[in-house]
Amino acid sequence: MTHAGWTRRGLLASAGVLGGALALSRIASAQDPAKKPAEPAPPKPKKRPFEISLAQGSLRKALQEKRLDNLDFAGVARKDYDIGCVEFVNTFFKDKARDLAYLHELKKRASDAGVRCGRILVDDEGALAHSDDDVRAKAVARHRMWLNTAAFLGCESLRVNLEGEGSSRKQRDAASEALNALGNYAEGLDVRVLVENKAGYSTNPAWLAEVLKQTAHKLVGSLPNFGNFKNAEGEEFDRYKGVELLMPWACAVSAESHDFDEHGEEQTIDYHRMLKVVHDAGYRAWIAIEYAGERLSEPDGIRATKKLLEKVRDELAAQDK
């Protein structure tokens, strides 16, 4: 018998003896009245109704005017607003999508600040809902590049728009084909592809819901925005109903805000009603601050939105008890 064989058999035998001893020990402990029963594990803290992130568009003026650098955005989110998750907009680092040194620095600064890179919002990279196959294929290729960037940064998702040309039906079919292609590509990256009600027919929630039903890819979902809703005729659509229609596919939510009254309430959107729609749909993930107003400064608009989100979150948490 070789030494190696003896060792394997010895280990197996020892394991059997040890396993039997442990089993007998457990039985004896259970039967020993002097032994106290194990203390029950403390209850896990209840998950909050949602967490708050910051969309980079909330500081678009500061970025456009070079008062804020993209590399510093995550640090500002933590230092100035105590927010631990951010959403980048590709247009603020559009020439850096393949610059590994830059992306490494962006990721490092976010990590050093204790901030999570949540997603990248992609604009101006081609018409994913275009009925022309070549135009759509080029758009898909550009978005694949940003999926790679999102994966490198550790983002959970990429937000896309559904711009295009052609009839409503043709754009629906084209969008579904493009989203399926991106979803298939994203499978190797562990990143989701989310559509926001922002461009073209996607502002019609009924149309966007049809696209998502037709796509039915496990990595393709929606990112409902509290604004930007129109019906098939291009008229304003009930924003609360619009968000409700998109919630079955929601993997992120954008809390658009514009202005606030003296009580801290948003003047164009009833946040209490809107967040109840989100909450009743079973959503318990990130909601991003997207301040789009003009009267307040960007910092004040962000703080006002955060304060209102926290107020309604506490109300929802109390209802859950």
Image (cartoon, helix red, strand yellow):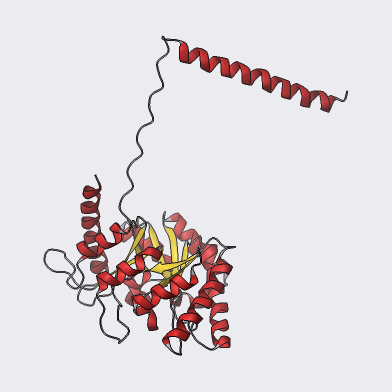
The percent position of residue 207, horizontal first and vertical second, equals 38, 78
Q: Residue at x 32, y 71 (%)?
A: 225
Regarding residue 86, the answer to whether it shows in the image is: yes
**Farthest residue in the right direction?**
1
**Farthest residue in the left direction?**
262
Regarding residue 89, the answer to whether it shows in the image is: no
Tell me if residue 296 comes above or below residue 1 in the rendering: below
The percent position of residue 163, horizontal first and vertical second, equals 44, 83
Q: In terms of image quadrants, where is residue 162?
A: bottom left
Q: Residue at x 16, y 65 (%)?
A: 265
Tell me if residue 174 comes above or below residue 111 in the rendering: below
Q: Quadrant of the N terminus?
A: top right
274 or 254, nearer to the observer: 274
The answer to whether 34 appears left or right of 140 in the picture is left
The answer to whether 44 appears left or right of 166 in the picture is left
The answer to whether 1 appears left or right of 69 in the picture is right
Q: Quadrant of the C terminus?
A: top left
The percent position of residue 139, horizontal first and vertical second, equals 53, 81
For the image shown, how many numbered marks are present on the structure?
0
315 or 91, nearer to the observer: 315
The percent position of residue 69, horizontal first and vertical second, equals 41, 71
